[in-house]
Image (spheres, rainbow, N blue to C red):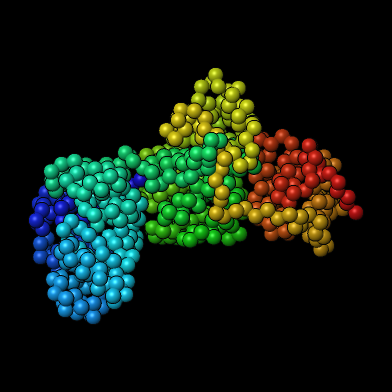
């Protein structure tokens, strides 16, 4: 993950006795010259901070008063509410010594019982925050983390690209709000226990060295990366299985219609709900339901795909995710579009850190040529690739895979490719047996990644937030009006009566010669009819995949594949050969 934001506590972290360390100031200047955004996050008031640190233009922004007040480009913005005058009057009446800013009220920690008594008697929505021997009184829900998120939203930056460094009790939320939290070794032991890392040293000069080190790398440290984990499900012994996504390229493989998009959607949902920005490239319209989640926009589908500058503008907002639905484009146009889109996404991510993850479904369609290095930035570790033809991916892509999730897989060529990535050829019989028996709600995490523990980890999938809707018998026997039925043709000449229900359509498929099915499939007639007449774009997408696989030579029994797509969608009673049972056509 790109390192784009540095959030620094002031007192005790980069300042001693209120004075900003000169070496830290120089390190901040160097980091900003390389494009890093630096924000000071402090409990001090702005005026007090200016007195000890001088003009505040040496950073990109300031979060003051423990999160209640922000400063950007010389303009301050109050997040919390000013304390009620009668509260301050009561503190004075009781002889409690304090100072106040625009929102915060600060006093000695020893006065906490008295101040708490005032708050309770006046029934005020105020909380006490301790920082060593000092006490701050703030409105509820105000913290350093809240203030940092507000500033970064205005700067169009994400806390998921941030490193925060702090020393005291009031820095817990600051470190939690950032993707990577660092506690200094000379500060609070409780904070060190919760931090992702502890910075050893004797004072601010150690912080200056850390800034220079991480600034040169421009990537978030890898030592601990559990905040971007998503829950896959539970293993047979009932233990949850989670997978860390940060800095990794993840592959999701399996047979057609084995549930790969379910696993991918599960991952997307969890990351989106945690505030990560995703770009999902959706060649067949499988991920439109993600639009029900906050901050998700679907482009394309029945309308032309968006212009790249429009996509880039949306992805500059840190809490927005997009799905690019290319389901209505011919294959060649999809390839042409992605040949421009993928390099743009990689360049955008290198400059801004967004999007955090790029999901490419049907990856074998687009990433099999030697030009993959022009399309995919292997150094990013930010891709999720979904495919039923792993063997068709370019070898450079396969080498860049860090973790593999497998759904039901029966193709021996694909199993051998999986073994080449994360197994031993001697395990082929065992893997074949396990993969072929996987049920729709099961999957396997391959070895080669720490979470797998050096072996195949079979698990039951976690539930989804956005579900694929399966309609039971909605259209199976619905009579279409004249002119809407599917007309089978042979060299342009109609064959038999038009199929005016999906049931009639499936039954008619069985008796047609392959040459007729071949012509319709290669032209995409079946998926076009389903989409235009029934407006069931999920089924149209499934049928379009069958047509595509047939054109590529990956589907041998075209009738069976078509019948299963429709039968699985509407639960038609299919026999062992894919033939509808118990259906009587008038």
Q: Which of 205 and 106 lies nearest the eye of the viewer?
A: 106
**Count the marks: how many?**
0
**Picture residue at 22% right of the left edge, 46% below the top:** 189
Report the side of 100 relative to 263 (left or right).
left
Q: Which of the 4 image quadrants contains residue 47? A: bottom left
Residue occupying the point 42% across, 33% down: 450
In the rendered structure, the answer to whether residue 185 lies left or right of residue 542 reads left
Which residue, as the protein is rendered here, is positioned at the far right? 586
- What percent of the width, then of the height, locates residue 322? 48, 56
What residue do we see at 72% from left, 58% from top?
A: 534
Q: Which quarter of the figure is the C terminus placed in?
A: bottom right
Residue 64 in view of the camera: no
- Does 296 sit left or right of 159 as displayed? right
Q: Is residue 563 above or below residue 152?
A: above
Q: In the displayed image of the protein, which residue is found farthest to the top?
A: 426
Rendering coords of residue 52 (x, y %): 10, 62
Front one among 51 and 501: 51
- Residue 266 place in picture, x, y as percent: 53, 48
- The residue located at (20%, 78%) in the rendering is 90
Q: Nearer the viewer, residue 273 or 137?
A: 137
Compared with residue 204, is residue 292 higher up or lower down, i.e. above or below? below
The N terminus, quarter of image:
top left
Q: Is residue 179 visible?
A: yes
- Relative horizontal placement of residue 285, taking residue 449 as reference (left or right): right
Residue 451 position within the rendered picture, expressed as x and y whole percent measured from the top left? 44, 35
């Amino acid at each position: 993950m790109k390192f784009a934001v540095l959030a620094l506590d002031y007192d005790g972290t980069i300042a001693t006795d209120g004075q900003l360390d000169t070496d830290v100031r120089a390190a901040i200047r160097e980091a900003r010259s390389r494009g890093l955004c630096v924000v000071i996050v402090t409990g001090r008031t702005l005026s007090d901070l200016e007195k000890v640190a001088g003009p505040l233009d040496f950073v990109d922004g300031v979060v003051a008063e423990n999160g209640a007040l922000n400063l950007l480009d010389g303009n301050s913005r109050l997040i919390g509410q000013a304390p009620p005058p009668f509260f301050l009057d009561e503190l004075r009446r009781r002889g409690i010594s304090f100072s106040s800013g625009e929102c915060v009220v600060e006093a000695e920690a020893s006065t906490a019982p008295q101040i708490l008594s005032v708050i309770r008697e006046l029934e005020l929505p105020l909380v006490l925050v301790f920082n060593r021997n000092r006490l701050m009184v703030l409105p509820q829900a105000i913290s350093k983390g809240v203030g940092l998120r507000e500033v970064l939203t205005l700067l169009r930056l994400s806390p998921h690209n941030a490193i925060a460094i702090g020393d005291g009790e009031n820095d817990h939320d600051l470190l939690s709000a950032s993707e990577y939290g660092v506690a200094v070794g000379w500060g609070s032991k409780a904070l060190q226990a919760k931090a992702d890392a502890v910075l050893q040293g004797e004072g601010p000069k150690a912080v200056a060295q850390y800034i220079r080190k991480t600034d040169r790398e421009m990537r978030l440290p890898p030592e601990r990366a559990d905040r971007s984990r998503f829950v896959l499900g539970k293993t047979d012994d009932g233990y949850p299985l989670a997978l860390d996504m940060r800095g990794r390229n993840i592959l999701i493989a399996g047979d057609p219609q084995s549930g790969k998009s379910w696993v991918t959607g599960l991952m997307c949902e969890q990351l989106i709900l945690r505030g990560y920005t995703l770009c999902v490239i959706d060649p067949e319209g499988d991920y439109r339901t993600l639009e029900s989640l906050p901050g998700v926009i679907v482009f394309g589908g029945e309308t032309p795909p968006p212009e790249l500058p429009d996509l880039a503008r949306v992805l500059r907002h840190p809490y927005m995710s997009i799905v690019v639905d290319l389901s209505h484009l011919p294959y060649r146009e999809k390839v042409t579009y992605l040949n421009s889109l993928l390099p743009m996404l990689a360049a955008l991510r290198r400059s801004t850190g967004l999007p955090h993850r790029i999901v490419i479904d049907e990856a074998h369609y687009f990433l099999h040529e030697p030009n993959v290095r022009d399309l995919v930035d292997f150094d990013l570790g930010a891709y999720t690739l979904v495919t039923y033809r792993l063997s068709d991916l370019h070898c450079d892509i396969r080498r860049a895979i860090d973790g593999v999730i497998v759904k039901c897989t029966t193709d021996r060529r694909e199993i051998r490719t999986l073994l080449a990535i994360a197994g031993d050829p001697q395990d082929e019989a065992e893997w074949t047996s396990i993969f072929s028996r996987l049920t729709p709600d099961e999957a396997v995490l391959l070895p080669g990644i720490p979470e797998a523990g050096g072996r195949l980890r079979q698990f039951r999938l976690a539930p989804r937030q956005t579900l694929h809707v399966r309609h039971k018998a909605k259209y199976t026997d619905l009579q279409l009006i004249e002119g809407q039925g599917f007309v089978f043709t042979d060299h342009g000449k109609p064959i038999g009566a038009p199929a005016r229900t999906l049931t009639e359509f499936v039954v008619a498929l069985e008796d047609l010669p392959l040459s007729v099915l071949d012509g319709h499939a290669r032209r995409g007639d079946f998926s076009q009819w389903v989409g235009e007449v029934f407006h069931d774009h999920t089924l149209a997408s499934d049928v379009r995949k069958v047509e595509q696989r047939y054109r590529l030579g990956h589907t041998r029994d075209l009738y069976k594949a078509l019948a299963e797509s429709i039968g699985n969608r509407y639960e038609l009673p299919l026999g062992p050969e894919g033939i509808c049972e118990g259906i009587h056509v008038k």
